[in-house]
Image (spheres, helix red, strand yellow):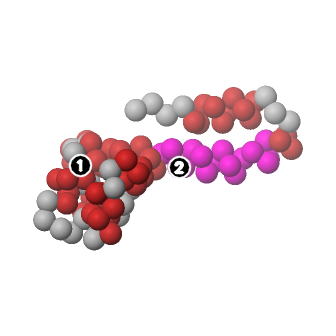
Amino acid sequence: MRLCVFPWCLSLAATTSPSQQETLFDPCLMLHGCSLQIVDDVLDLTGSASILGKPALNDLKSGVATAPVLFAAQQQPNLCTLIKRKFKGAGDLDEVSK
């Protein structure tokens, strides 16, 4: 997965005045941080422990509904039940990782 947010923020900074740069700094930093978190969330669903350096599905095993799961729940309402019970039901992790 390629991150293009950071270069976009840099190019934006290069073409704006110092006062505009100051105004845009926090939103660009937040956007970059959010994009990194989404990549981490996707890797948690699709990666292996050897690649991640931590157990796969770690967030879900901890009961945390990550962005990809929340987005998928908009199209698959059955995931809302799994989210509400924090993925503790039998087969929940298998179901959500499909």
Q: Is 26 situated above or below 8?
A: below
Mark number displayed over residue 34: 2
- 32 relative position to 36: left or right: right
Write down the region rendered in magenta.
Answer: 21-36
**Chief SS of the magenta region:** helix
Relative placement, left or right, of 68 versus 10 is left
Q: Which residue is mark 1?
A: 97
Query: Measuring 54% from the left and 49% from the top, which residue is drawn there?
Result: 33
- Answer whether residue 93 is visible to the viewer in this image: yes
Check disc 1 and give the amino acid type: Ser
Within 10 angstroms of label 2, few (less than 14), some, or many (20 or more) residues? few
Above or below — where is 11 with respect to 56? above
Q: Quadrant of residue 43?
A: top left
The residue lying toward the viewer, choosing from 71 and 62, is 71
Q: Is residue 31 above or below residue 93?
A: above
Position of the C terminus, as image quadrant, is: top left
Q: Residue at x 57, y 44 (%)?
A: 32
Q: Nearer the viewer, mark 1 or mark 2?
A: 1
Where is residue 35 shown, x and y percent of the image?
Answer: 51, 44
**Residue shown at the point (19%, 60%) measured from the top left:** 92
Q: Disc 1 or 2, which lies upstream in sequence?
A: 2
Q: Nearest the camera: 7 or 83?
A: 83
Kindly identify the residue that appears in the image at 30 percent across and 57 percent down.
79
Whole-number angstrom distance, CA of label 1 to CA of label 2: 21 Å
Q: Secondary structure at mark 1?
A: loop
Amino acid type indicated by mark 2: Cys
